[in-house]
Structures are given as structure tokens and as C-alpha cells.
Image (spheres, helix red, strand yellow):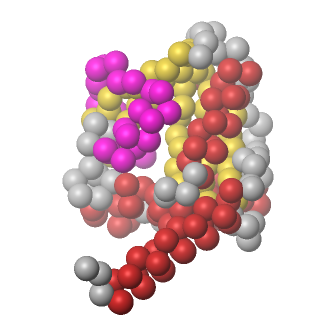
Amino acid sequence: MCSWSQSTRKAQRWYQQARRYDQISMMDPRKPEVRDAADLGSVHVRAWQAAYRGGLMPDEYLESLSAEQRAEMWRTALGQPLGPRRARFVVEDALGTVIGFIVVGPEDGDEDTPAGELYAINVDPDHWGTGAGRLLHDAGVDALIGAGFDRAMLWVHPDNARARSFYESLGWRSDDVTRRAEVMGVEVPEVRYSISF
């Protein structure tokens, strides 16, 4: 039997979750602009620090990440035109704050490949489980299909159970191809997932 305080805490968690979902449920993904760079830098760092703790990446490296440096990286990228068959999207909360992003394009950057790639998708951890990731994913997949790709792939850390579960719930499947890759200066193991359209 739950105590009054336990019931209250459960109700508060449910309310907070419902409120977060309501904040983004009507927000359509849009293309990012240079003015979004600071929000994107914050999302990038907070998502990595939450997702890759516990041995997926060195804690010292995660602690050293700078939202300002990531914002500058985004500012530079957003100031340049996207290459062909590439797309970026963000989703905002009700206050207009960017809470997630996705970047897609041709596999390995090869313009002539029939396969697309989901390069990155990150959502601020305060908004995990709200549907923001699914909104971004669907926008990215629609862009890949619109660019003429008939399939796509992505790379994910093999121990990132949350991300793997998310991708699998959307139809992606591991094809057991693995590699070690340098990601923002850190070498990590990765496993490939694929999907056909």
C-alpha cells in the first residue's frame, strides 16, 4: 500500500511528464537557424553527458565538454549551406527553446550512394520519453526518403541500451557490423543499424 507521500510523488512525476509532452506535442520539427546555436550547444552537451556516463565514454571527457564550444561548432555549421541530400531539424518546447536535433544525409557523405545515414539525433535529457525523439526521427526519415534513398543506416554505441531500444521500436535492426570510430576526439565501439524504406 502506497503512503500519501509516495502517491503524491507519483502524481507529481505523472504531471511533470504529461506537462513536458504537452509542451512539445504540437511543435513541428523545423530547420535550425544560426540563432539556435546556443540551445543546440546545450542540448548536445547535456544529452551526451546523460547518455554516455557509466563507462560508455570516459567521465573526465564528458565533464570537459563545453556547451559554448559546441554552440560555436553549430554556429559555424549553420552559417554554411547544407550539401545535397542532407537535412537538419530541431524541435522546440512551448517556450521556443530548442530541445533536440537530428542530422541526416548520404551514407559516409558519399553523394552517389543509394543509402542514407542518420548521423546524429540528440534530445535534452529533461525531455526524454516525451515524443521529441520520435518527431525528429520521423522528420529525418521523411527527408531521407524525399532525397531518394531507399534505405538508411546509423551507428550506435553497443552498450547504449536506451538508444538501441529507441531505434528498434522504430523499425531499425542491427546487422551485426561493428567498428571502432573516433567521435569528437574519443575512440568508441559502434554497431551498425539499418532500415529499408
Q: Residue furthest bottom?
A: 4
Quarter of the image for residue 167 reads: top left
Quadrant showing the C terminus:
top right
The x and y percentages for residue 78 are 72, 47
| Rendered view: 64 above or below 146 | below
| Rendered view: 19 above or below 53 | below
Q: Residue furthest left?
A: 55
In this view of the protein, can residue 110 be seen by the observer?
no
The x and y percentages for residue 115 are 56, 15
| Rendered view: 130 above or below 158 | below
Q: Residue at x 42, y 56 (%)?
A: 48
Closer to the camera in the image, 70 or 176: 176
Q: Residue at x 28, y 37 (%)?
A: 158
In this view of the protein, can residue 139 be seen by the observer?
yes
Stretch of the chain drawn in magenta: 160-184
Closer to the camera in the image, 125 or 42: 125
Question: Does residue 2 appear left or right of residue 14 in this picture?
Answer: left
Q: Residue at x 42, y 85 (%)?
A: 8
User: Would you say residue 178 sits in the magenta stretch?
Assistant: yes
The x and y percentages for residue 109 are 57, 23
Q: Residue at x 77, y 37 (%)?
A: 81
| Rendered view: 113 above or below 189 | above
Quadrant showing the N terminus:
bottom left
Question: Does residue 89 appear left or right of residue 118 in this picture?
Answer: right
Question: Does residue 159 appear left or right of residue 68 in this picture?
Answer: left
User: Would you say residue 106 sits in the magenta stretch?
Assistant: no
Q: Residue furthest front?
A: 1
Question: Does residue 75 appear left or right of residue 33 in this picture?
Answer: left
